[in-house]
Image (spheres, coloured by chain):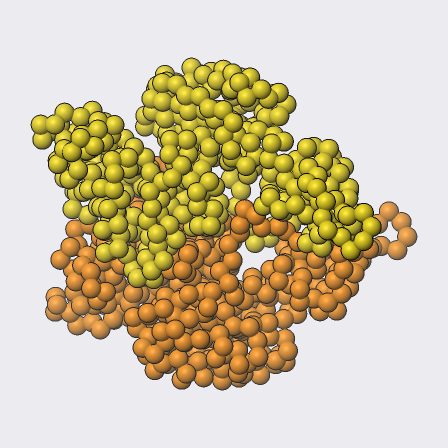
Chain colours: A orange, B yellow
């Protein structure tokens, strides 16, 4: 549950069952001899660990392979159906839950309109109840559940799983989310902010080849999830990617709810666009209304979304120079109004960022859609549970 | 020489001699039994690897430890004197070279006034000649040299060691620096930009406990080196940290040499301050002149440095929200004029960044001084050469 970060002095333990499993997660079946050759472990050690993984159901025999003579050696492959995880994506007014296998494939899903401002207990009670129901509907025993991942719509200290001064979540500040849910469901619970889990879901399912990815959620608020070197980058206090209150050039007169002026959210969020539209005579309450107006062809709505894309691009241009990603993925409800938002983003980034940083930069629309958060919350648990150093301790039958 | 980035699918090899060495790099002597217990390797395997490391000179017997009876078991410790590295920090008009042991301790140093604009061959010929001389002066045989690290004052594609469109380095674009130097000195050569190696030098020698560090070089230009999770973060094309051309709010009328307006370098670099000072009637040619005026008590110089600190802080405020470092280290020649620059940086960052990102944020002056670049260039080679997965292949006597 800690914010893992590799240290110069960290020492790899002897490769255990977890390392073998990590190797097999690419889906390629391998023999014991191949596993021994790749890991450098003795054949007898591999046999013991393969047996442990078989007993845990995490790998399965996958047929036989050609041999030079005698009985063909058995091959083994990752068995993603062995266990399941639950991912919960809790938004401001809507919650989604998904149960997936260990490959992130959704087995069942549910969702509900529930206001995060009700406070942690009613909302998390829904997560607990919905988890029990979804396990029943997926017809999987509770013992198959590896853990639960939860995304919250505000800053989260990932190492403790607690929200930290979340602006739209009264009652949640410092609440021990993992303890509350874990006590009721008896499995490990990981918590992160909604944008990090959406970034992880997009990366895992749609862009695994992009090791340096920025995921932008443009909705009522604006946030950024960062994948650095293939992993969620959270920074020192888990606050990385909080771009909504970075200052936009030329927006000094826009008052932000955070107390500062000129913040990105004060000019480019769904809330800001809705207010501007309303002021122009087209009533809109939030990003959903804005998107509906845009889809209906409202020129002011389209212009405001395009300008929001430029403002987001302005802030991202700095992030591109700073972070040098290979892809920026644009998601969130504002991105659902066609290409207007992403066009504005592209316009400014390619104008403002340096050639070296943009030469191979892709700017793409999110692919996973509304389920990216729930899938990503589950992926967070999968990556955590199947981490070799952690799994080695969980699987019996280990001997160096 | 590639831009290493961990992948979800990466598999740790069996811990070899390199892993034992990595463990021992903390300086604590350990017995074979302790090494076996920590790594999970069989005692016989540990013995073979300890022998290999002893033969390579990378560890040494370090006395005996208390025992319950009989002959006390031998302990072994890292021997940083075993090998050496050379780090070269090539600036716009000045070059520094240092030879260090494997702990980054400087054994000998040299420097020269040499203009980077002479082109790669004359400058690198100096590196080659100075390396030969410094090895002689350090009285170390060439065979002790693990490699050479080189920092260049411009964007570098770390995976190839080539400068990419460097603005102040005519003739260097695409030049194969590692090949040119390696052909002449017969050792591996790693290249990075000057700010990355300075960040690494500061992190390694002064702030090893800060895993998420930003190092700012404020001099003729302005750049940022990023340490993320304890390692240099370079991004997809090695361009990460290029903050000099991020737009500063309210500076739209400042023309930058990059072609855009409002870039940080156009208002806050030593060159920009010197131009502003000159325009105000205090002639200054560059950051060194600016610092001299400031030290002599010139109020315009002090005010301009303070404002440059605010402008740098404005851009860093975004980076703090985005990257959430635990420390920002301010270095470069402009930082040598007392606390004026850092005061301006602090003023804006604490005003503009979010509480979660600044709650534990330290903003400190660089400690390593002028040698940070050369030391960091050497550290880059040490970290590369002593990386367990690489070292395992280099040291004979390995058996799983």
Compared across the picture, whether B244 is left or right of B45 comes to: left
The one of A67 and A92 positioned closer to us in this rendering: A92
Residue B106 appears in the figure: yes
Residue A292 appears in the figure: no
Could you tell me which quadrant the C terminus of chain A lies in?
Answer: bottom right
The one of B154 and B387 positioned closer to us in this rendering: B387
Compared across the picture, whether A272 is left or right of B231 comes to: left
Residue for point 39% across, 63% down: A195
Residue for point 57% across, 76% down: A187
Asked if A190 appears above or below A306 in the picture, the reply is below
Query: Looking at this rendering, what residue extends furthest in the left direction?
Result: B281
Asked if B185 appears above or below B49 in the picture, the reply is above
Query: Looking at this rendering, what residue extends furthest in the right direction?
Result: A70
Asked if B313 appears above or below B180 in the picture, the reply is below
Residue A267: give x, y in percent of width and height: 21, 60
Residue for point 41% across, 83% down: A121
In which quadrant of the rendered view does residue A333 lie? bottom left
How many labels, in total?
Answer: 0
Compared across the picture, whether B212 is left or right of A138 comes to: left
The one of A368 and B122 positioned closer to us in this rendering: B122
Residue A261: give x, y in percent of width and height: 18, 59
Residue A316: give x, y in percent of width and height: 31, 50
Residue for point 63% across, 58% down: A388
The one of A231 and A97 positioned closer to us in this rendering: A231
Residue B149: give x, y in percent of width and height: 50, 29
């Amino acid at each position: 549950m800690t914010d893992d970060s590799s240290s110069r002095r960290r020492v790899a333990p002897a490769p255990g069952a977890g390392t073998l499993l990590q190797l097999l997660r690419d889906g390629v079946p391998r023999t014991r001899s191949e596993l021994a050759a790749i890991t450098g472990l003795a054949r007898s050690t591999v046999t013991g660990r393969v047996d442990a993984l078989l007993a845990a159901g995490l790998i399965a025999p996958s047929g036989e392979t050609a041999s030079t003579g005698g009985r063909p050696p058995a091959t083994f492959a990752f068995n993603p159906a062995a266990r399941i995880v639950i991912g919960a994506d809790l938004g401001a007014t809507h919650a989604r839950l998904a149960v997936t296998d260990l490959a992130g494939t959704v087995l069942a899903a549910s969702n509900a309109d529930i206001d995060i401002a009700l406070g942690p207990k009613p909302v998390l009670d829904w997560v607990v109840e919905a988890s029990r129901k979804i396990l029943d509907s997926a017809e999987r025993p509770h013992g198959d559940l590896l853990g639960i991942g939860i995304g919250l719509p505000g800053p989260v200290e990932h190492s403790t799983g607690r929200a930290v001064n979340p602006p739209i979540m009264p009652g949640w500040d410092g609440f021990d989310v993992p303890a509350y849910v874990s006590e009721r469901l008896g499995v490990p619970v990981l918590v992160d902010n909604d944008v990090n889990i959406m970034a992880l879901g997009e990366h895992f399912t749609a862009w695994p080849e992009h090791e340096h990815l920025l995921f932008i959620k443009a909705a009522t608020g604006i946030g950024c999830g960062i994948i650095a070197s293939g992993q969620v980058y959270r920074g020192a206090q888990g606050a990385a990617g909080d771009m909504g209150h970075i200052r936009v050039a030329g927006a000094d007169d826009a008052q932000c709810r955070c107390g500062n002026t000129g913040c990105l959210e004060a000019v480019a969020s769904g809330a800001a666009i809705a207010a501007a539209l309303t002021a122009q005579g087209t009533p809109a309450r939030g990003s959903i209304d804005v998107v509906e107006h845009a889809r209906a062809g409202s020129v002011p709505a389209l212009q405001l979304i395009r300008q929001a894309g430029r403002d987001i691009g302005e802030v991202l241009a700095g992030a591109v120079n700073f972070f040098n990603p290979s892809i920026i993925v644009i998601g969130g409800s504002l991105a659902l109004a066609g290409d207007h938002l992403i066009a504005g983003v592209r316009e400014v980034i390619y104008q403002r960022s340096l050639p070296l940083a943009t030469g191979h930069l892709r700017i793409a629309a999110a692919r996973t859609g509304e389920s990216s958060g729930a899938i990503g919350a589950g992926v967070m648990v999968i990556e955590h549970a199947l981490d070799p150093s952690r799994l080695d301790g969980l699987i019996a039958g280990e001997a160096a």
